[in-house]
């Protein structure tokens, strides 16, 4: 058995080397085999979870099937069953097989960037941010194919279950991390690029005074800190960093850090790819020498 397919221990959290190894596995054909090994190891020490581990992982036919089953199981209710949602996933994956590439990239982002994710099955089974973005991917596919009522139902259900409110028309790239996810609001015309990390209680919203294209455009590799609000049809440039609690009302260029209410540019972003670095501290920047209103 692979050395990383081991029981999770709270006294021995995953190291950066562990997460780097898991990231390599995500990018290879070994992904599904490794998830099966992890689930089998977990089952051996926690037999009470047999229905979950067998149904969500061990008895599934592959990675895409497992994700569709797990997310559908969390979303299903008496009005719209998990089977109906699973059937919608199956239709989407059959029509657009590249959706599984987005699933894989999102799981890679999770194990690369979140130190709380020590195994592939941690995020896959339990992390609502991962489930929320995969719910949105189905809702967005349904929206693009004219099934708007089903898409809006999934938006509503995701808000209820995962505490995220993402309009089905919003466009997301691949490799998205919704860390914790609680309180995330994303408007209809928002666009989020590849490899973006978004913390909890973030709003990508309008100003309330516009119609049409009225929501933010987030470039590749951006890190958006907890509680940040980005409002209006403005662009946040590639690999920018938005500090926690900021209210951003004007566009920000690439490779900078913005902070404050209203947000100001306070310096360079501090690293090559903020979304991967996940550093929300601003201690490396000298506010007085850099700050100006954007």
Image: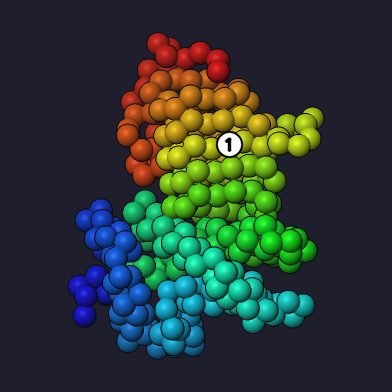
Say whether residue 14 is left or right of residue 132.
left
**Relative to 219, is 149 above or below?**
below
Residue beneath disc 1: 217
Q: Residues within 10 Å of mark 1 (few under 14, many from 20)?
A: many
Answer left or right for 106 relative to 191: left
Q: Residue at the spot x=39%, y=54% of the render?
A: 109
* Residue 164 picture location, percent across and down: 63, 55
Q: Is residue 13 visible?
A: no
Please tell me whether residue 1 is drawn above or below residue 229 in the rendered image. Answer: below
Quadrant the N terminus occupies = bottom left
Q: What is the basis of the colouring in this image?
A: rainbow
View extreme (front): residue = 95
Q: Quadrant of residue 145?
A: bottom right
The residue located at (47%, 77%) in the rendering is 66
Q: Is residue 26 above or below residue 199?
A: below
Residue 172 horizontal side relative to residue 140, left or right: left
| Quadrant in the picture for the C terminus | top right
Residue 214 in the image: state x and y as whole percent. Answer: 71, 35
Q: Quadrant of residue 3?
A: bottom left
Among the 4 quarters of the image, the one containing residue 10 = bottom left
**Image label count:** 1
Q: Secondary structure at mark 1?
A: strand
Q: Nearer the viewer, residue 133 or 51?
A: 133
* Image point (36%, 85%), residue name: 43
Q: Name the foreground residue: 260 vs 123.
A: 123
The percent coordinates of residue 35 (x first, y second) are 35, 75
At a point 21% along the width and 75% down the height, the residue shown is 2
Q: Is residue 61 visible?
A: yes
Q: Is residue 184 left or right of residue 129?
A: right
Q: Position of residue 156 (x, y in %)?
A: 72, 61
């Amino acid at each position: 058995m692979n050395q990383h397919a081991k029981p999770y221990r709270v006294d021995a959290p995953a190291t950066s080397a562990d997460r780097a190894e898991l990231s390599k596995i995500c990018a290879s054909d070994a992904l599904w085999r490794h998830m099966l090994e992890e689930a089998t190891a977990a089952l051996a020490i926690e037999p009470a979870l047999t229905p979950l581990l067998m149904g969500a992982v061990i008895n599934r036919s592959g990675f895409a099937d497992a994700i569709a089953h797990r997310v559908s199981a969390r979303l299903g209710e008496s009005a719209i069953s998990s089977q109906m949602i699973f059937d919608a996933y199956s239709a989407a994956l059959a029509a657009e097989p590249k959706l599984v590439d987005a699933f894989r990239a999102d799981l890679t982002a999770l194990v690369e960037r979140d130190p709380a994710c020590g195994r592939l099955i941690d995020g896959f089974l339990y992390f609502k941010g991962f489930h929320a973005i995969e719910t949105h991917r189905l809702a967005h596919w349904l929206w693009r194919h004219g099934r708007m009522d089903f898409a809006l139902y999934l938006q509503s259900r995701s808000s209820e279950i995962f505490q995220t409110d993402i309009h089905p028309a919003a466009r997301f790239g691949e490799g998205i991390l919704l860390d914790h996810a609680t309180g995330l609001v994303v408007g209809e015309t928002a666009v989020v690029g590849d490899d973006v990390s978004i913390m909890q209680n973030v709003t990508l919203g309008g100003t309330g005074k516009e119609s049409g294209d009225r929501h933010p455009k987030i470039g590749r590799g951006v890190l958006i800190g907890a509680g940040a609000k980005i409002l209006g049809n403005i662009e946040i440039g590639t690999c920018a960093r938005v500090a926690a609690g900021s209210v951003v009302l004007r566009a920000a260029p690439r490779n900078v850090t913005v902070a404050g209410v209203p947000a100001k540019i306070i310096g360079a972003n501090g690293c090559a790819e903020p979304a991967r670095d996940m550093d929300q501290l601003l201690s490396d920047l000298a506010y007085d020498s850099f700050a100006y209103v954007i």
